[in-house]
Amino acid sequence: MPSIFSKIIAGEIPAFKIAENDHYLAFLDVFPIKRGHVLVIPKQEVDYIFDLEDEVLAGLNVFAKKIAIALKKAIPCKRIGVIVLGLEVPHAHIHLIPLESEKDILLSNPKMTLPKEEMAQIAAGIREFI
């Protein structure tokens, strides 16, 4: 059964896309723990990130780096935190989260619900720096 991320890739579920190429996709988390929380995924549906082929894993990280650089410019912060947890959706993914402190990266933090207009504005702001 396709994951929710595969449905986003296929266009069956809308997303606030940041960047996309033939192999990878970056989009805003719809329930972010911080404003600007981005998910970066391979388009290949693989559950566990370390089951990706070496070239795909390396490409995913290079793609995520480009997104993280743009994210830091769009959402001023001390750092962009990176989490690879992989338990919540059975599709390999990287979380990029703007940080002011270590506590900002805890996925147990309350999830935010932002208006669609604000999500679209955040996505557009990040895309400006790519």
Image (cartoon, rainbow, N blue to C red):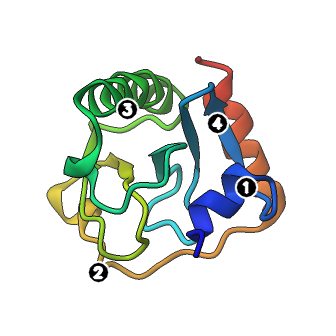
Residue 60 is marked as 3
Answer whether labels 2 and 3 touch (C-beta < 8 Å).
no
Marks 3 and 1: which is nearer the front? 3
Q: Considering depth in this image, is 124 or 101 the residue closer to the camera?
A: 124
The Cα–Cα distance between marks 2 and 1, rounded to whole angstroms, is 23 Å
Answer with mark 2 or mark 3, whichever residue precedes in sequence: 3
Task: Indicate the position of residue 44 as horizontal and vertical percent values.
Answer: 50, 45
Query: What type is the residue that disc 3 sits on?
Result: Leu
The Cα–Cα distance between marks 2 and 4, rounded to whole angstroms, is 24 Å
Determine whether 64 is above or below 3 in the image. above
Query: Which quadrant holds residue 113?
Result: bottom right
Q: What residue would you read off at disc 1?
A: 15
Q: Considering depth in this image, is 100 or 123 the residue closer to the camera?
A: 123
Task: Indicate the position of residue 80 as horizontal and vertical percent values.
Answer: 31, 39
Query: In the drawing, does residue 70 fall left or right of residue 95?
Result: right
Task: Indicate the position of residue 77 as horizontal and vertical percent values.
Answer: 36, 38
Determine whether 103 is above or below 118 in the image. below
Q: What residue would you read off at disc 4?
A: 18
Numbered disc 4: secondary structure: strand
Which residue is painted at 58% across and 76% down in the image? 1
For the C terminus, the quadrant is top right
Determine whether 3 is above or below 127 in the image. below
Query: What type is the residue that disc 2 sits on?
Result: Ser
The Cα–Cα distance between marks 3 and 1, rounded to whole angstroms, is 19 Å
Query: In the drawing, does residue 95 fall left or right of residue 12?
Result: left
Which residue is painted at 35% across and 25% down in the image? 65
Determine whether 6 is above or below 70 in the image. below
Query: What type is the residue that disc 1 sits on?
Result: Ala
Q: Considering depth in this image, is 89 or 78 the residue closer to the camera?
A: 89
Answer with mark 2 or mark 1, whichever residue precedes in sequence: 1
